Amino acid sequence: MSDLPDGASRRDLLIGGAALAAAQGFATLAFARPGMAPVDRLSDADMVLAEAGAANAPKVGVAEGLKASAFLSSDDPFAPQDADFDTAVKQLQADRRFSVLDLEGRAITLDRPLDIDDGEGNPFTKPLKIVNGTLIPSDKWQDPEAPLIRFHSSSGNRVARWGLEGLKLKCLNRASGVFVDGGYINMRFRFLDIDDPARFGIRTRVGDSTGSDLRVEHCDITSNSADKLASKRVLIGLDLSTDNDGKVFGNRIQKARTAIKGPIGSFLISHNHFWQGSDVGLPRTDRTPVLHFGARSTNVVAVNYIDNGVTVLEEGLGGSGEARTMGFCQFISNIFTLAESDAAGTYISIKPAGPGRGLSNMLILGNQIRNIGGHAEKIARPFSVDTSAGGMVNTALGSNIRIEDNYFWGQVQPQSSLVEKFIELSKKKSYPVDVTGETPFDLDADVVTQIGVRADGDPGSVWYKRAAGRRGTLQVGNPVSGKAYLVLTVNAAGLFG
């Protein structure tokens, strides 16, 4: 017994379903398969595919069209396939709300970037998503800085709701990956495999506009041509501009010079694996930033594996300007590793560009800090200041800093914003206290937050007398035997500076 309406065939129902989807602003658009029949001669099997496409993957056209300024071919680079692609592009309808260009699993070879614009180099202003295929640079490709896909935008009209999903960009170290040229809102890059990009995996340059709500999820950016020495590499995984409100989740970026670089703000970066590759030489001294942010990035970096590299907060990065106070970043429950590091290794570094910089609003909580390998030297400053740009930190200007409850594994000097000291009392009235090397970023620990004493008699008054910077004395009113416990904090902004 049929469940179709009286007098209706399965073909009628399927065509009706596609028409209904179109009426709602959705329609299927993909490459024509060789020998494909016109719609009125499609078989029931073909219509089932059409129905599934319309119902499950809304795919429609836009007014501006889509420019394919490239030579296009199938897997055979000598077999041009321009007609299929051009036909698909031209069939995009002017009255649709959202467009998905489905590559149908095909491999397309390009001589030049695939420019997403209106055909005249102006912004392509309607929502667009490209899915399900492979792009490869041909042997005619000239510029390693040029991306396989380039989205065009402008300062006056930020584009919205662009995306790529399920694509493989096989760059062959000839081309780069994806470039967003101008302002945007709601960009989505999901399940991309960007293999061996020459200069960058994904790059944004918003210029005098703004970029917000960038999402990069479950992507793999891998360099197969990387030099073993990180300092000789050029690849940036995510090369970002002054973007805000981004989410970078569940990605793997490996053997790049830097995984994420840019003066970005309010990014949530979580559940990623950033791997710099194996060690070179014993101990390993070659280091580049895995994460490279501006001085006041306001990013939250949580639950990542930051593998064999350093994180840097740099004043002035990417034109981010002067920052009298640095920090404003959170690192929570990550795994930081260095392999076979020398004593000068570090995990999080701040790089001021001028004198007298303060540090504030920084949380580094619950992380694992590891120095792996039998040839590793003890890392003296896991949280350090890079003075190579001529800048300095005022070590007395620490405010709202919580660097606590981190686990230091292997050859690493523990550091904390709250330094605990246990002092043996031996019937004297004064005991030296030195926290040098135990405070992050060489900050002063000038204020005692707790004092406890267990002694064989009445110690009288017990207090801490600051001497200079990270040194002082514990003063005891009456000479007794026993133990004293002190907790000193770096959070004494300007009290003695």
Image (spheres, helix red, strand yellow):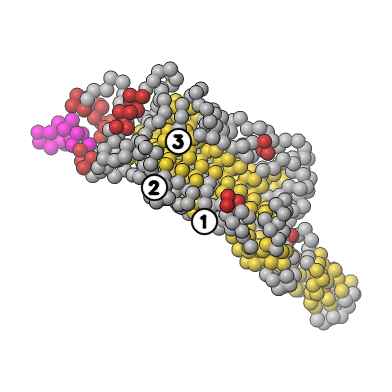
Residue 258 painted magenta: no
Find the magenta span and give its range.
Answer: 1-18
Q: Do the residues labelled 2 and 3 touch (CB within 8 Å)?
A: no
Q: Seen in the image, is 354 located left or right of residue 121?
A: right
Mark 1: amino acid: Ser
Q: Seen in the image, is 53 located left or right of residue 277?
A: left
Q: Residue drawn at (66%, 60%), measured in percent from left and top?
A: 403
Foreground disc of the pair 1, 2 = 2
Foreground disc of the pair 1, 3 = 3
Quadrant in the rendering for residue 152: top left
Q: Which residue lies furthest to the left in this view?
A: 7
Q: Residue drawn at (52%, 56%), measured in percent from left and top?
A: 266
454, above or below 3, in the image: below
Q: Earlier in the sequence, mark 1 or mark 3?
A: 3
- Crowd rating for badge 3 (residues with CA inside 10 Å; few <14, some 14–19, many 20+): many
Front residue of 258 and 433: 258
The residue wearing badge 3 is 149
Q: Residue drawn at (72%, 40%), measured in percent from left and top?
A: 286
Q: Residue drawn at (49%, 54%), measured in percent from left and top?
A: 244
Numbered mark located on residue 266 in the image? 1
Distance between the alpha carbons at the discs numbered 1 and 3: 26 Å
Distance between the alpha carbons at the discs numbered 1 and 2: 20 Å
- Asked if one can make out residue 52 in the rendered structure from this viewpoint, the answer is no
Mark 2: amino acid: Val
Q: Position of residue 204 (x, y in %)?
A: 49, 45
Front residue of 159 and 382: 159
The residue wearing badge 2 is 159
Q: Determine the secondary structure under disc 2.
A: strand
Distance between the alpha carbons at the discs numbered 2 and 3: 16 Å
